[in-house]
Each structure stands twice: as structure tokens, then as C-alpha cells.
Image (tube, grey):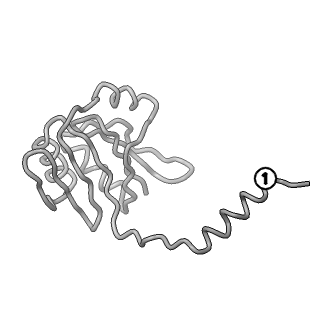
Amino acid sequence: MYCFLADLNNHFKQRNMHTVYPQIKKMSPLFVVADLEQSLNFYTQNLGFEIDFRYEDFYAGIIRDGFSIHLKLGYSAIKNRVSNSDDEHIDLTFEIADIHDVFEVIKTLPVTIIQPLRQMPYGTEFYIADPDGYTLAFLE
């Protein structure tokens, strides 16, 4: 008896053996922001990022420790983002060291803390929101 699914599965297995995927050198999430300057200030002044590049007045890249985020001026659905924080929707997670010390510093900054420092089965974490309501998790 002919099995189409088995034949299809074998085809893809054979095809993938010969496929060469490019090496990923860098990956950058893109956040759509309502005010580019406000976002740049938030990330550089509060989280230690540096401006990597700017393109005209609507696009920028920020970088820290070799990791980057791209920011693009546009419609920011902040209301949806704030409502997502109710169910602990996370947009970006930073895995860090010395989380207790970092949290003590974060508490002194003008940032919105969504989830205070807490111990979870997978580690210690806290969440903050950026000016556009993106939820940033910090985990150790």
C-alpha cells in the first residue's frame, strides 16, 4: 500500500540533508515606537545601551554587549501592550548576572516595574515596561 505522507516525509529529509543555511551573525528584534527620541533616551539612559546607528528621523539601532534592538517610528499599540502585561506577556528577555543588584538599581530609575523581583522554578526574574509598553523581562 502506498503511503503519501511517508513518501513526502522522506523527500523532505533527503532535501534538508543538502540544504545549506547561512550562519546567523546577529539578530535584532524590532520595536515600533511612538517617539523615537523618548525610546532612545529610555534604553541609553536606563539600560546602558548605545546608539549603533540612526537612519533619517524614523529608524535607529541600539546595542549593548553585542546585542541589538532596532527601533522604528510608527503607530505604537501601547494600549494593547499594557493590557498584555496583565497576563505577563513578555516581548524581550534579558538573561543577566547579579539580578538582585540590578533590581536595586532599576528601582531607583524612572521605569515602570510590572513584576517585582521574584523567585520562580526556572530562576529569579523581574519585568519592566518601556515607554511604548513593551515588557522587558530580566532573568538570572
Q: Residues within 10 Å of mark 1 (few under 14, many from 20)?
A: few
**Residue located 11% across and 55% down the image:** 54
Q: Position of residue 127 (x, y in %)?
A: 36, 42
**Residue located 28% across and 29% down the image:** 77
Q: Nearer the viewer, residue 27 or 81?
A: 27
**Residue located 60% across and 68% down the image:** 16
Extreme residue in the left direction: 56
Q: Nearer the viewer, residue 32 or 122?
A: 32
Give the SS element for disc 1.
helix
**60 displayed left or right of 79:** left
Please name the residue that numbered disc 1 is placed on. 4
Q: Position of residue 2 (x, y in %)?
A: 86, 55
Q: Position of residue 46 (x, y in %)?
A: 18, 50
Q: Is residue 31 above or below residue 2?
A: above
**10 displayed left or right of 87:** right
Looking at the figure, which quarter contains the N terminus?
A: bottom right
Q: Is residue 133 above or below residue 27?
A: above
Identify the amino acid type marked 1: Phe
Classify residue 13 by image quadrant: bottom right
